[in-house]
Image: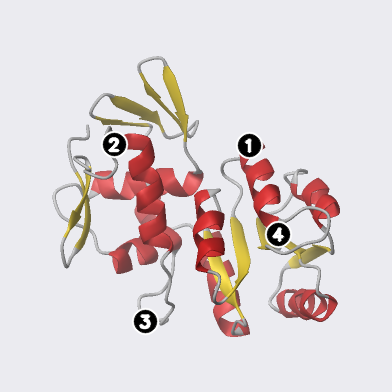
Amino acid sequence: MSRKSRLLIIEDEEPIRVGLEDLFVFHGFEVETAAEGPGGLAKALTGTFDLILLDIMLPGLDGFAICDQVRAVDRAQPIIMLTARTADADIIQGLRLGADDYVAKPFSVTELVLRVQAVLRRSGALDVEVNRIRIGDLEIDTRNLSGRRGAKEIPFTQREVDILKYLAANAQRPVSREELLNKVWGYARDCGLETRTVDIHIAKLRRKIEPEPAEPQWLVTVRGVGYRLLGQS
């Protein structure tokens, strides 16, 4: 019998927390929950969960602080943040801190399950072993999720490395947002999910790999098509 995926839900609103727990247990997950920030952080830092579903507004410690502290010790931990539909700044901040994706409230339970399953699913396109990527004067060790430019060390998340690996493997052509969502995040092409997570992750990557992020020379936009990684080896 295969092991059940372990999900941590950190959500202070009891009806939502209980409903999500029931939903994911029904879908075959092993679920633990936390109703406030400090307790949620303590569970998250055990490193025993396949994915953390993290609300932003929490008593004691908000979701941003939890995400930041988890990322400080584990850059590969999958995290999806729950945010108010109108809070664009919350979405951007959560993804900048290292969340893999976000789901806006009020959300469709079908969409939420699809996103969780997709983040947990590893794409076959990423199975090719790429241990190092060199972009200009930056060398990235994909196994250790770290880059080095001269004496400066630059940390990367697992999602950022996965994006770079896919773009590097397809450097001969531009890659669309939809293809990245399909191949890196694992979303089905026809599932109809809308997300800006690709663009925000690209912006994060540019701040790490580009000398001038506002005028990228390595991770470029091909207007009307998508993104292309240049100058890598």
Q: Between label 2 and label 4, give the one nearer the viewer.
A: 2
* Mark 3 vs 4: CB contact within 8 A: no
Residue at left offset 75%, top offset 49%: 44
Position of the N terminus, as image quadrant, is: bottom right
The relative height of residue 53 versus residue 166 in the rendered view (above or below) is below
Mark sitting earlier along the chain (2/4): 4
Circle 3 packing at 10 Å, graded few (<14), some (14-19), many (20+), is few
Q: Residue 210 bears which disc, if any?
A: 2
Q: Residue 3 bears which disc, if any?
A: 4
**Percent from the top left, x then y, of residue 195?**
43, 70
**Percent from the top left, x then y, of residue 50?**
66, 55
Q: Between label 2 and label 3, give the one nearer the viewer.
A: 2
- Give the distance between the C-alpha atoms of the residues marked 1 and 3, in whole angstroms: 35 Å
Please indicate, yes or no, whether residue 129 appears anywhere in the rendered image. no
- Give the distance between the C-alpha atoms of the residues marked 2 and 3, in whole angstroms: 33 Å
Mark sitting earlier along the chain (3/4): 4
Mark sitting earlier along the chain (2/3): 3
Q: Between label 4 and label 1, give the one nearer the viewer.
A: 1
Mark sitting earlier along the chain (1/3): 1
Circle 4 packing at 10 Å, graded few (<14), some (14-19), many (20+), is few
- Give the distance between the C-alpha atoms of the residues marked 3 and 4, in whole angstroms: 28 Å
Q: Is 6 on the left or on the right of 166, as rendered?
A: right
Q: Is 40 on the left or on the right of 215, as rendered?
A: right
Q: Residue 190 bears which disc, if any?
A: 3
Q: Is 51 on the left or on the right of 134, as rendered?
A: right
- Give the distance between the C-alpha atoms of the residues marked 2 and 1, in whole angstroms: 22 Å
Camera-side residue of 67 and 86: 86
Camera-side residue of 201 and 187: 201
Q: Between label 2 and label 1, give the one nearer the viewer.
A: 2
